[in-house]
Amino acid sequence: MSLIDQAKEQMAKTVENTKENFSGIRTGRANPALLNGITVDYYGAPTPIKAVASIGVPEPRTLSVTPFDASQAGAVEKALRNSDLGISPNRDGNVIRLTMPELTEDRRKEYVKLAKGKAEDGKVAVRNIRRKTKETIDKAVKDGEMGEDEGDRLLKDLDKVTKSVTDEIDTLLETKQKEIMEV
């Protein structure tokens, strides 16, 4: 596998990570991904909420969380209440409902800033991958393992890949911004 292919692979993982980070940012709609970071104290062990409950979207602004084990509904509700979502869970028997409030303009702008920060983190990671790959190429040229022409060609390819990946992150950011600002 060439250095460029390795860099592409690492950059693709960075893009996926950025997408995951974006999925945790609230928009006006209910999205099960909002609950990804929440853990439930399940018989004394911190367990991801997905492992102890099914999550559904019965209405555009409502999430329903149904624990697989009815006796754990209280623990699931507590985990949701203590999370940083800022949404109060409503328990109806074994079903816990989370109703997403309408986002204010200020809140939307905060979320856009958050999305920009996550996009920038992704770009920084891509640039770090580029820098490490460039150092490897420069070292190989210096040590005589490859010719200067080949090194220059690889650097140009690396720059093309880096640009396309950062453009992809920018596109993801634009999409997320539109999603957030949509009323």
Image (cartoon, helix red, strand yellow):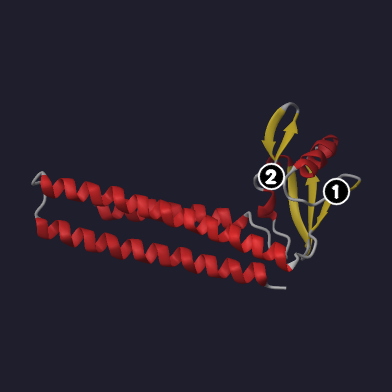
- Which of the pair 62/105 is nearer the observer? 105
User: Label 1 is placed on what type of residue?
Assistant: Val
Describe the element under mark 2 as helix, strand or loop: helix
Mark found first going from the N terminus, 2 or 1: 2
Residue that sits furthest to the front in the current view: 106
Say whether residue 56 is left or right of residue 21: right
Q: Give amino acid for label 2.
A: Lys
Could you classify mark 1 by the number of other residues whose Cα lies within 10 Å: few (under 14), some (14-19), or many (20 or more)? some
> In terms of depth relative to the viewer, which is nearer, 55 or 106?
106
Residue labelled with disc 1: 95
The vertical placement of 131 against 167, above or below, is above
Where in the figure is residue 170, as x and y percent of width and height? 47, 66
Question: For mark 2, what is the residue?
Answer: 50
Q: Crowding near pointer 2: few (<14 within 10 Å), some, many (20+)? A: some
Rendered image quadrant of residue 72: top right
72 vs 145, left or right, is right
Query: Label 2, label 1: how many angstroms apart (C-alpha)?
Result: 14 Å
* Residue depicted at 53% across the width and 65% down the height: 173
Element under disc 1: strand
Which part of the image, by quadrant, shows the C terminus?
bottom right
Where does residue 10 sit, x and y in percent of width and height? 38, 51
Asked if the residue at tag 1 contacts the one at tag 2, i.e. Cβ–Cβ closer than 8 Å, the answer is: no
